Each structure stands twice: as C-alpha cells, then as structure tokens.
Image (spheres, coloured by chain):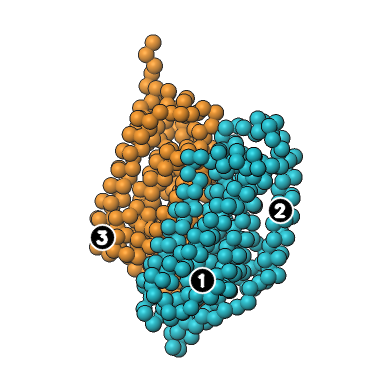
Amino acid sequence: MKGFWTEIKKIKRKWIWGAPAGIFLVDLAWMCWTLSELESGELKDGCYRILMSLPMINTITLPVLAAVLASRLCDMENKGNTYKLLCTLQEKGAIFRNKFILGGLHILVFAFLQLSMIVFLVWYYRIPQELEAEQMVYFFLSTCATTIVLLLLQEVLSLMMDNQLYPLFIGLIGTFVGLFSWFFSLPLRYLTPWGYYCVGCTINNIYYKETREVVFYTVSFSYGGFAALLLFAAVLYIYGKNLFLKKEV
Amino acid sequence: MKAKKIGLTACIKAENMKLKRSFIWIAFFIVPVIPALMGTGNYLQNIDVLKMEWFSLWTQHTLFYSNFFYAPLIAVYCAYTWRVENFNHNRNALMTAPVPTGYIFFAKQLNIFWVTLLTQIWVWVLYVLCGKTAGLPGLPDSVIFYWLIRGAWGGMGVATLLLLASMVVRSFAVPVAFGLVGGITGLLASNSKYGMYYPFSLMMMGMNSNQYENALGGEELQFMIFSTLYIVLFSLCGIRWLAVRDVKA
C-alpha cells in the first residue's frame, strides 16, 4: 500500500488525468455532434445508436489513451533515471503492479464518466427509447476490460523500452488495427486486443437500401471472447512482470 | 573572449544531424502505409458506388489518414525533436549555446516542416502505387498533388502548435494525444462553418479530405492567410516562451 501511495505522490501536479479528461470531452463533443445531426424520427432508437457509436469512437481514442497513460507513468522513471534507486528501496514487482493499478484506476473512472455521459445524452436529447441496464453493463465491461488489457500491454512496452516512441507508435498502429477489426470477418476480430471494442459491442444494424432505413438490434455478449482476453491478460501480466524483474537497471 | 555567434544554417544542420538514423523514420514509413491499405481495401469493396476512379480512391485514402493519423504523426515528429533535449541536461547545453533563441526554434520548426512535406510526398507515392495495384488507368490528376502540398501547408500551423506543446509539456506522450484529439475536433470543426478558423481543420480542408471536389472553393486566399497566421502566431509564442522561461533541465 505504501508503494501505491508513493506512485500517487509521484503524479502530483503532473496532470496525468489531463489526457483522459481531454478525450472524454472530445467523446462528448463527437456524440453531441452525431446526435444533433439526427432527425427527430431517428432518435427513436437513439440509445442503440449511442451504444454502437461509442465503442467505435473508443476504438480510435482509447488505444492512444492507454499508450499515453502508460508512457507517462513509466517514462518519469526513465527521465529521472530513478530505477537504480527505486529497485533498492522497494520490491521490483511492486513497481510494476502499482503503476498498473494506478493506470487501471484512471481507466475505471473514465469508463464511469462515459456511462454518465450516456445517461446525460439520453436526457438532454430527450431520446424516447428506454436505456437498458443490461446493455450499459456490457458496454462498461467491454470498455474497461479491453482498455485495461491495452494499458497492461503498453506498460510492459513502456517499461522495457527507454525510447517511448515505440510504445506510442504501437498504440497508434493499434488504433488502425482496431478500426480494421470493424471490417474483419467475425473470427479475425478476436485475434488482436484492439479488436475487442468491436467484439464487446452488443448492438448491430442493418441498412435497407430500398427504404433507406437503418434498423438496430441487439446481439449476445461474447463471454467466450472476453474470457480469452482475460486469459491473455493474465499471461501477459506474468510474462511482462518477469521481463521487468529480469531487466538490468 | 567573445563567443562567436552561430548562424541559422548551422542550427538547421545540427537539427538535421539529430534526425539521422532516428526512430521517427520508422513511423514515417509505416504509419501512412496502413491508411493506404485500409483506404484501398475500402475502395475495392465499394467499387460499385465509387465511380470516380482516382478521385474516389483519394476520398478513401484521406478518410482515415487525415482525420486520425496525420496530426498524431506530426506530433510524433515534434515530440521526438524536443525529447532529445530533455535528457542528459541537453536543454542546458542548448540554451547556453551562443545562438539566438529564435534560431533554435526556427531550426526545429524547419526540420519538422521538411519531414512533414516528405510525409505528404510519401502519401502520394503510396496513393499512386495503391491505385495502380487496384487497376486504375493512367495517373491521378495533378490537382491531387496540389491538394497534398496545400494540406502540408495547413499542417505547418499544426506542426508549429505541436512543437510548442512538446517544448512546454516535456512529455513524449502528451503531444501525441493532443494530436489525436486535435484531429478529431478538427473533423468536427471542418463539418461546421468554423473550419477555416481552426488549425486542425485547415490541415484537413487543405488536403481536401474525403472530398471529390475542391472543399475550399473560392476560399483559397482565406485558407492561405489563416494557415500562415497560425504559423506566425505559434512561432512567436514558442520563441517568447523559450526566451523567457527558465530551462529547468
């Protein structure tokens, strides 16, 4: 616990929360723009529209957010060249764990803010459709799980590489891969962690050319897919921590 | 003994040397390849609807590149340029060199400018290669090359802003996130009547992103004025900040 409080003290006045806050505001602006473009008739399935648009926006923004958060939490040690000192004062594995928990907490707060944003949008735009709690839970779970796994991946990269260009570059590439995954056939989406925003989206739509109508419908949540993602996260955590433990400081 | 003042050319040469074999070339080559592949794939999938050959391919290429990846890529260049100064007390050495502060900023800025211009040319090469691979006849209209160069000029304002941000924030990750957020807000602004006043939208409008016809119409002069204004404004802010603030290396 002491180590965790030390991590919190390290980020004092570092504006670490600036990146999640900025991205949250962009999400809000984007959703407001999308909803204000809709005609009143199209708002009848507004909740499903929001719950389908947000995972797409998250695919673009959250891999970079995870990369930025991990890089900021880890790069301060590179900059200050503090590893030698830190590793003689505390358990090396605890550094890895505490940075991960701290980053994860930021993601958790961000995901809660997104949930409250959905409620706000439904209220503000007077969307007549009922906001289903079940769909909100699925959205929250998929956002949290996917972003936290990406954060873990980025943390391993940021701790192992002195040059932060590579982890950020991988985060950017991840955004591409995530965007691609919306066009992938079903099994291919499961292959990369960035594709899980799409896997976790429980809303789909069909476009009828003749009537120019879009019909939204729900699909079942992929428990199997997310179990595989969590298994990947567990393996990555153990492997990443071992890599960091073996790293010469 | 009075120290001999170093000229702007020498500063530019020094900055160029810092880019030699640097990591930014990996980002330079790889990042534009992915939207090129995505755009071409999208074009081939919707070839029944997209009838304007090279122009249609252009809309698909710029759809992802200019909205989500152009600004973060410039941010990577800017962040790298300042990152080398943030280690080993290099900022102290830089600021105590017998060089006017304006030269330091201009040298870095010109460096970013030519790398950004090269990026745009690389995007054009990829666009032609993808078009030929997709079986398009002849070569693209020269106006598309003009749009790319115009987009580069619009991007210079953003590059100067991100260079300023990288200098102030001293984090590699934050300018990249700023670039992404700027790209998204730029997309929103370019779809409104305020696009001409927002630097990130100027970049997209200059590139004629996702458009068949010239998005600027009769507003070319206005575009040039605002782009130049932002370059001058952010440069002045940057030079002033560099001259006034303490080094704190």
Q: Residue at x 68, y 70 (%)?
A: A223
Q: Is residue B127 visible?
A: no
Q: Are marks 3 and 1 on the same chain?
A: no
Within-10-Å neighbours for mark 1: few <14, some 14–19, many 20+: many
Give, as a three-letter code, the residue at label 3.
Glu
Point out the tag, 1 or 2, that comes first from the N-terminus.
Answer: 1
Chain where mark 3 sits: B
Q: Nearer the viewer, mark 1 or mark 2?
A: 1
Q: Residue at x 45, y 84 (%)?
A: A213
Find the distance from the CA under tag 2 to the CA under tag 3.
53 Å
Viewer-proximal residue, B182 or A100? A100
Residue furthest to the bottom in view is A210
Q: What color was chain B assigned in the picture? A: orange
Viewer-proximal residue, B75 or A154? A154
Label 2 element class: helix
Q: Residue at x 43, y 58 (%)?
A: A26
Task: Indicate the position of residue B206 as horizontal and vertical percent values.
Answer: 35, 58
Q: Which residue is mark 3?
A: B219
Q: What color was chain A assigned in the picture? A: cyan
Q: Which residue is mark 1?
A: A51
Give, as a three-letter code, the residue at label 2.
Leu
Give, as a three-letter code, the residue at label 1.
Leu
Q: Which residue is mark 2?
A: A236
